[in-house]
Image (cartoon, grey):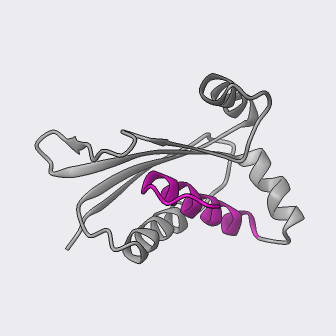
Amino acid sequence: MSNVTTLIFVESRYKVSRKRIKNVVARTLTTNNIHSNVEVSVAIVGDRKMTLLNGKYRNKTGTTNILSFPLAEGEQTKLPETNTTHLGDIVISYPVVIKEAARDDMLVDEKVEQLVEHGLNHLLGIHHE
């Protein structure tokens, strides 16, 4: 039996379902046959913060919908004395999510789930074409 820890940080003015985020993390790990103890963090931020991160880590200007930061590219990193693997961090821009949800005719929480799954796949080393 695996233990999944999902750390969630949401800037106070943004409304997201923490339960849905935790459920999509658990479901994505199960789908990918991850059965060890894992931890992942998800941050929901504004465009100012996302623009800073996008510039610092990708040398790109402007905001983006999601950034994924694997803790160690290609390596498993165990947290001390817990036997838990920290996969990394997922950062999502709430203002971009609102625009994309409207464009795609989706609920905001559905778009957040879709992006969390996408980001988690990147943390697991599963990349899109």
The stretch drawn in magenta includes residue 124: yes
Q: Is residue 24 left or right of residue 108?
A: left
Farthest right residue?
Answer: 103
Location of residue 94 in the rendering, given as x and y in whole percent from the top left corner: 71, 47
Q: Nearer the viewer, residue 98 or 38?
A: 38
Q: Quadrant of the C terminus?
A: bottom right
Farthest front residue?
Answer: 129
Location of residue 36 in the rendering, given as x and y in whole percent from the top left corner: 23, 64
Question: Does 15 sit above or below residue 68?
Answer: below
Main structural element of the magenta stretch: helix, strand or loop?
Answer: helix
The magenta stretch is 107-129
The stretch drawn in magenta includes residue 96: no
Q: Is residue 68 left or right of residue 66?
A: left
Location of residue 127 in the rendering, given as x and y in whole percent from the top left corner: 55, 58
Tag count: 0
Q: Quadrant of the N terminus?
A: bottom left
Question: Does 98 sit above or below residue 108?
Answer: above
The residue located at (39%, 68%) in the rendering is 29
Q: Is residue 128 left or right of residue 26?
A: right
Q: Nearer the viewer, residue 15 or 30?
A: 30
- The answer to which image quadrant residue 37 occupies is bottom left
The residue located at (27%, 47%) in the rendering is 76
Question: Does 66 sit above or below residue 113?
Answer: above
Q: Is residue 81 left or right of residue 49?
A: left
The residue located at (85%, 72%) in the rendering is 105
Location of residue 108 in the rendering, given as x and y in whole percent from the top left corner: 73, 63
Q: Nearer the viewer, residue 60 or 108?
A: 60
